[in-house]
Image (cartoon, grey):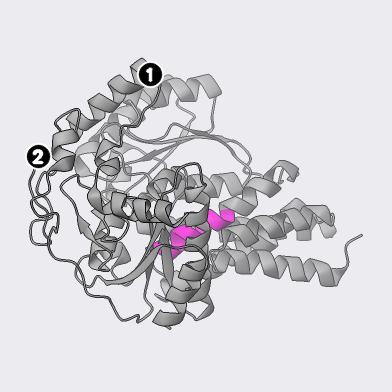
Amino acid sequence: MVTEEKKAELLAKLRNAVIQYDEDTAKEAAQEALDVGMEANDAIFNGLVSGMVEVGKMFEAQEYFVPELLMCADALYAGLDILKPHVKQLDLGVKGSVVIGTVEGDVHDIGKNIVKMMFDVAGFTVYDLGRDVPLDKFVQEQLRTDSDLVCLSAMMTTTMTGMKKVIDDLRTRNPNVKIMIGGAPVSQDVADKYGADGYAKDATNALKDAINMIASLKKMKDEVEAKKAK
Amino acid sequence: MKTSLKRELLDHGAAVVGIAGLRGYLSGEISHLDRAVSIGVDRKLNEDTLSQLVSLQKRAVRFLKARGHRTLAIPPDSDRKKDTFISKLYSLFNHKMAATSAGLGWIGKNGLLISPRYGPRLSLATVLTDARLKPDAPVEHCLCGECMLCIEHCPSKAITGSEWSRSSPFAELVKLNACRSHKAAKRATDNKPNCGLCINICPYGRRNSDMKNAER
């Protein structure tokens, strides 16, 4: 059984590895956590994710900029890759699968990848179609995988219009699917006009939003556990 | 700090280390990291140049971070993991730009960094940082002079003979398509993708390797 002291030390190590964007330490600490028999969920949410939440604050305070944010995300992923196979499925009430990609003609995928990370952390099954994805592919993939959610990303006004077509097609084939869109030119107005269910602001904000969503997932998890405890 | 950083890297196998000042050259996402530590490793055959370069780069990052500075390591071109977030920013900056700005050499007629001592036989890695390191004097012009050896020996006639200078960084030095299709053809016939004659023939590189052979 792992002592509370060792546990706190490892959580701090994981957290700092993310904040210090140190991939090697993140991997090392993740492995150590498994070796001493810590819960993978605990290591992810109270270690890695808690570090990323702090990174989000530092980004808001302009202590960190985009490069640091990306490197922190890489460090988080490095640890996550090791811990994830040992995760017990989280009972968040939001389990599901998601199809995600950047629409045809668009090769900008930083924002999309960050959002994908968020879903990964939350324990979703993610079907990542990559970037410059032919519009039909989204519909096919959704039908093939029977996913609950489809996320579309576009960075340019010229490619954004492709989203409308995908949304229309999805709605005719499967009225129940939820659709989220995001990217620099997208606004709440566009989301409403195109008939999307949700929207995230732009690449930089997608970073922030992703961090916020991770933070809120963490909160949800705590609440679920608090309820269980009662 | 600059001297001790350089010594640290040179002691651990770097052939050359230079500091570039990059104010005004960088795009918005990375403009706060306006110094570059340019690291060159002598590209000897049959040795693991790449892992040496990566470990030197990590060493530089540790050195700077320990002193409270921000860093962004741009890995060697042959070690870019495409699936990382940060890899999206690598294309914003290239190693040869750092190396010429740091005074390590110029861009030769063959389009490669030519170091006065090692010729085109260096492998490069860069660490961007906000540490206030004093920049070395940049190299402004091509110093190949009248030498035409790489042009004459290029099997695909890809080298145009134009000369690089800092003021005309986009001059077409090498017809990349010609070079690429030659390499592809070579791969198809004898399964060796690399040509490398323009590296091999360069007198600057030869001189150094001759000297080393003589020492042995």
* Viewer-proximal residue among B37 and B208: B208
What residue span does the magenta drawing correspond to? A67-76
Outermost residue to the right: A1
Q: In this rendering, is residue B181 above or below B23?
A: above
Residue B196 in which image quadrant: top left
The magenta stretch spans residue A71: yes
* Viewer-proximal residue among B130 and A54: B130
Q: Amino acid at mark 1?
A: Asp
List x then y, in percent, for residue B97. 24, 59
Is residue B75 shown to the viewer in this render?
Answer: no
What secondary structure is found at the residue carrying circle 2? loop
List x then y, in percent, for residue B63. 51, 74
User: What type of secondary structure mainly makes up the magenta span?
Assistant: helix
Circle on res. B160? 2
Q: Earlier in the sequence, mark 2 or mark 1?
A: 2
- At horizontal 42% and vertical 74% (from top left) the residue drawn is B6
